[in-house]
Image: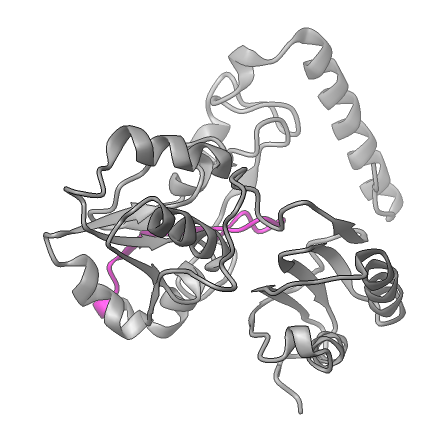
Amino acid sequence: MIEIRLTMTQTCIATFYKFTPLKRLKALRAELLDFCKSEGIRGTILIGTEGINSTVAGPAMSINALLSHLRKCKEFQGLEAKFSYSNKSPFHRMKVRIKKEIVTLGVTGIDPAKTTGRRVTAAEWNALISNPEVVVLDVRNTYETRVGMFKGSIDPGIKTFRDFPQFVKSNLNPKKNRRIAMFCTGGIRCEKAAAWMLAEGFEEVSQLDGGILKYIEETAEGESLWQGGCFVFDHRVGVDRALAPGGYEMCPSCRWPVTAKDHKHADYEQGVSCPHCRSSLTEKKIASSRERHKQIKLAEARGIKHLG
């Protein structure tokens, strides 16, 4: 069944994940890599004993073929995907990697396939986070929250998802903060964070089903409590309410989303640095980034892709 409809010139970008016990990881890696390459699909698929996590891009028919292929396996039955579209592929290669965690929290003994938070639909979300008794928690990294957040939510100010447990232990108390509502880009980090918080004794933990991307897709602008754009991990950097590129570029040194205003700052250098990271870069790093940016521009002038 065809799930995606778009023009022939557009690339379909699909994100999906599923917490499910997996075995035979080496064989599965080889199988998925061969399948994706044969279908002209690029991107990254992470697999581990806890499940699968992926963002891939390619022709619509190829993306449908991959999803159909996965759903034939009992472990991936019911696998859901979110789609967006671009005029070019955001990825240069196809990678399938075996990881200890498909999203790294750094805490053992957590199994979101068995226990996770209460899923809240986009239609239910506004009422939940408008309740003053509910602590609304952003589970994303600080460079993501810069692009956009929900009104009234808490930015934990973390550099990586690994820092989330320490933030909670230092700032929240299961006996006082009984009701938690959390959100992230597509839902996967909330699945794991919610499972951990429940294990830590938090009484009621809810998560935005499908994440920010599904919320902005399904919620009318006049009813939306989302402010700004949504950071995504590809060349678009941020997307707007229509899931179209939102006018950001990504700093290659620190991954910080760079705005047009940042371009005017003395510490901004295209392909090298931004105001957020320039002071922390060594001269060796700056020289290396300049050379890489030079090679990228030379490749573009020759009409070829730079893969370094």
Q: Where is residue 299 in the image (x, y as percent from the top left)?
A: 85, 40
Look at the image and give the residue range highlighted in magenta.
223-238
- Asked if 210 appears above or below 108 in the picture, the reply is below
Viewed as shown, does residue 104 lie left or right of 290?
left
Residue 150 in the image, given as x and y percentages of width and height? 28, 52
* In the image, residue 230 lies in the stretch drawn in magenta: yes
Q: Residue furthest bottom?
A: 1
> Residue 67: x and y, percent?
69, 76
- In the image, residue 77 sits, relative to residue 249, either above or below, namely below
Q: Which corner quadrant of the image does residue 155 belong to?
A: top left
Does residue 42 lie above or below 12 as drawn? above
Give the residue at x 79% y 52%: 95
Whether residue 174 appears in this view of the structure is yes
Q: Residue at x 82, y 59 (%)?
A: 29
The structure residue drawn at horizontal position 65% and vertical position 9%, both measured from the top left corner, is 282
Q: Nearer the viewer, residue 300 or 202?
A: 202
In the displayed structure, does residue 267 sit left or right of residue 135? right
Is residue 127 part of the magenta span, yes or no?
A: no
Q: Quadrant of the C terminus?
A: top right
Question: Is residue 259 at least partly visible in the picture?
Answer: no
Q: Quadrant of the N terminus?
A: bottom right
In the rendered image, which quarter is residue 5 located in?
A: bottom right
Q: Where is residue 265 in the image (x, y as percent from the top left)?
A: 46, 21
- Residue at 46% x, 29% y is 262
